[in-house]
Image (cartoon, helix red, strand yellow):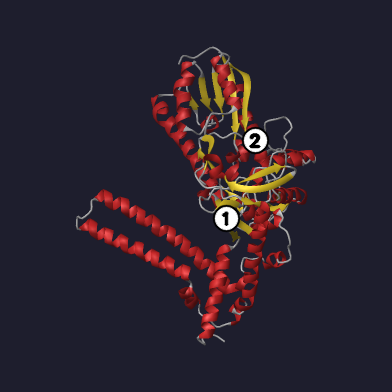
């Protein structure tokens, strides 16, 4: 590169948050960089500052920076023929990108490059500096950036796993504790809105109906509420100048485990330290910490709503809410939801339900049942089941006071016994499969196929077995109260007619069969089964004189 008589200089200054580490904030400050470069230029008689280009708060891991882009635009326009930085790391910490700029891009535009503290000047640099010293320094800068990225990720991971909140903003319904920014506390006003949203969903309101109701009440959307509190909050979900409640916003709230006290973080991660783009991680890789903060919604209510979200709960035509059985009523034979029909004839109105599979394509029978008949059967089914459970309470309450061995109860539990027998069957099948493979009876491909099938079956049974054992363990340890709020079941004995709230909180599913039989599946069904089993065990043990 030939020397010029005069140079128009671009002074490039950069400082990232990472540069504040290890006491470097003062030496790397924008002011410090500016003073060093100005002092250098004052000693030159053929240089004049064209402009200052300042990227304050921008990482050197990539070149997607506003001031840097503006400088490159001025270089391409021919306004600049010299770039001066304090040191190579200010230009960038990506050694490939920095090397390309210094060795190719700047020379192509006849731009002189000077890094003052590294004693580098492209006009006077010899072969060793160009080919050895410069790449090594750029590589070290890149390694520093990568090391910082690894440390930051490690610290964030540790904080997430310990239940510390590391988000920039608290989610709607919470705010950061002023005494501990890594802990969430309830925002009473917003928490009240959250409670209403969950209650309205249970009452049968659709996402759209809930959003419309909130907008009609003049309730600020989560974004507008944060802005009203002085938070500089932005989101990619905003589509209008003033954000309103939307069906999507309501849906996100109803599915957020945060509201039951579980802190869920790490849902996405940066591709790498050089790329700003983030990718969504699989749900099983999210970091979940239960009881990290105070809950707004009970776990029971949250589970009820999650069950409703899995089914079709669209509101009836011209109404905001769903019908009484929406999301709960299913065909006993094909498993599809039942469809509600209204028949008006000669001034009389009859409401009945038919199988949606029959209604759509006649692939099932009608399973038709009048709502009046269904109401009576469901209410009777609930009451009879509850009466049975409450009758068993007197027996089950003895569990804590009796000297019984848990292993004896496990051996009496038919579900657990059957699951263990099924598991043992697949264990033997796997062993026999391996022997057949060793003897050459089956080939390697068949061995792999059937081995994978048996492994999958074995793992599924293992999961079911763990759940059954846990249910029994809790019941044995704490009695009938374990995980069950019996007061609501006592109250139902006094109910004379069903309402949506009672039904949704008590019932998981209702199956209607072609002969008009109705089977009601109550919530906590597994625990009810264990209650009955434990009751039988106690009666059996008393009969044999094993307990007093």
Residue in the picture at 25% in, 50% down = 444
Label 1 Cα neighbours within 10 Å, binned few <14 / some 14-19 / many ≥20: many
Q: Quadrant of the N terminus?
A: top left
* Discs 1/2, front: 1
- Outermost residue toward the front in this view: 346
Residue in the picture at 39% in, 59% down = 458
**Left/right of residue 440 with respect to residue 9 in the rendered view:** left
Q: Secondary structure at mark 1?
A: strand
Residue 214 at x, y = what percent?
76, 41
Label 2 Cα neighbours within 10 Å, binned few <14 / some 14-19 / many ≥20: few
Q: Which residue is mark 2?
A: 237
Residue in the picture at 56% in, 76% down = 535
Above or below, 379 relative to 286:
below
Q: Secondary structure at mark 2?
A: loop
Above or below, 106 relative to 14:
above
First in sequence: mark 1 vs mark 2: 2
Q: Is residue 43 visible?
A: no
Q: Which mark is residue 547?
A: none
Looking at the rendering, which quadrant does residue 39 occupy?
top right
Residue 442 at x, y = what percent?
23, 53
Residue 323 at x, y = what percent?
68, 47
Q: Which mark is residue 511?
A: 1
Q: Nearer the viewer, residue 310 or 249?
A: 310
**Left/right of residue 402 with respect to residue 203 in the rendered view:** left
Q: Nearer the viewer, residue 63 or 158?
A: 158
Q: Quadrant of the C terminus?
A: bottom right
- Outermost residue toward the right in this view: 217
Residue in the picture at 59% in, 47% down = 354
**Left/right of residue 390 with respect to residue 115 in the rendered view:** right
Q: Is residue 109 visible?
A: yes
């Amino acid at each position: 590169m030939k020397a010029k008589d005069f140079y128009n200089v671009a002074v490039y200054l950069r400082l990232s948050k990472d540069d504040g580490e290890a006491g470097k904030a003062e030496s790397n400050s924008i002011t410090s960089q500016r003073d060093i470069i100005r002092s250098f230029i004052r000693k030159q008689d053929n240089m004049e500052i064209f402009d200052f280009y300042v990227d304050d708060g921008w990482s050197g891991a990539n070149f997607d920076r506003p001031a840097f882009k503006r400088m490159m635009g001025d270089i391409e326009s021919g306004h600049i023929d010299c770039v001066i930085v304090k040191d190579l790391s200010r230009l960038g910490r990506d050694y490939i990108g920095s090397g390309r700029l210094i060795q190719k891009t700047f020379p192509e535009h006849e731009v002189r490059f000077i890094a003052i503290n590294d004693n580098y000047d492209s006009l006077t640099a010899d072969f060793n500096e160009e080919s050895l010293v410069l790449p090594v320094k750029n590589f070290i800068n890149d390694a520093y950036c990568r090391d910082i990225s690894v440390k930051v990720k490690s610290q964030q991971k540790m904080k997430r796993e310990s239940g510390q909140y590391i988000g920039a903003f608290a989610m709607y319904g919470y705010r950061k504790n002023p005494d501990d920014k890594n802990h969430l506390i309830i925002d009473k006003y917003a928490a009240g809105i959250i409670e209403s949203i969950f209650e309205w969903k249970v009452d049968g309101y659709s996402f759209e109906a809930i959003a419309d109701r909130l907008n009609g009440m003049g309730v600020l959307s989560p974004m507008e509420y944060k802005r009203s509190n002085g938070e500089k909050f932005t989101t990619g979900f905003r589509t209008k100048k003033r954000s309103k409640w939307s069906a999507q916003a309501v849906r996100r709230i109803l599915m957020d485990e945060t509201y039951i006290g579980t802190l869920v973080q790490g849902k996405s991660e940066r591709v790498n330290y050089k790329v700003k783009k983030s990718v969504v991680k699989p749900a099983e890789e999210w970091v979940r910490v239960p009881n990290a903060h105070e809950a707004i919604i009970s776990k029971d209510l949250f589970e009820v709503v999650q069950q409703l979200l899995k089914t079709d709960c669209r509101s009836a035509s011209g109404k905001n809410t769903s019908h009484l059985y929406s999301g709960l009523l299913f065909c006993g034979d094909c498993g599809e939801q039942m469809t509600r029909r209204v028949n008006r004839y000669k001034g009389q109105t009859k409401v009945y339900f038919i199988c949606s599979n029959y209604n759509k394509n006649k692939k099932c029978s009608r399973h038709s049942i009048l709502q009046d008949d269904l109401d009576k059967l469901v209410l009777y089914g609930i009451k009879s089941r509850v009466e049975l459970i409450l009758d068993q309470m007197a027996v089950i309450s003895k569990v804590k006071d009796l000297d019984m061995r848990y292993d004896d109860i496990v051996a009496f539990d038919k579900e657990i016994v059957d699951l263990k027998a099924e598991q043992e069957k697949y264990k033997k099948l796997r062993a026999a499969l391996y022997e057949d493979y060793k003897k050459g009876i089956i080939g390697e491909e068949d061995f792999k196929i059937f081995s994978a099938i048996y492994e999958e079956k074995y793992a599924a049974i293992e999961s079911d077995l763990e759940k059954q054992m846990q249910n029994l363990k809790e019941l044995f340890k704490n009695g009938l109260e374990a995980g069950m709020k019996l007061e609501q079941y006592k109250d139902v004995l006094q109910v004379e007619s069903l309402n949506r709230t009672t039904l949704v909180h008590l019932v998981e599913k209702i199956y209607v069969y072609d002969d008009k039989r109705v089977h009601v599946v109550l919530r906590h069904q597994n625990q009810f089964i264990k209650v009955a089993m434990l009751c039988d065990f106690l009666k059996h043990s008393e009969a044999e004189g094993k307990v007093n």
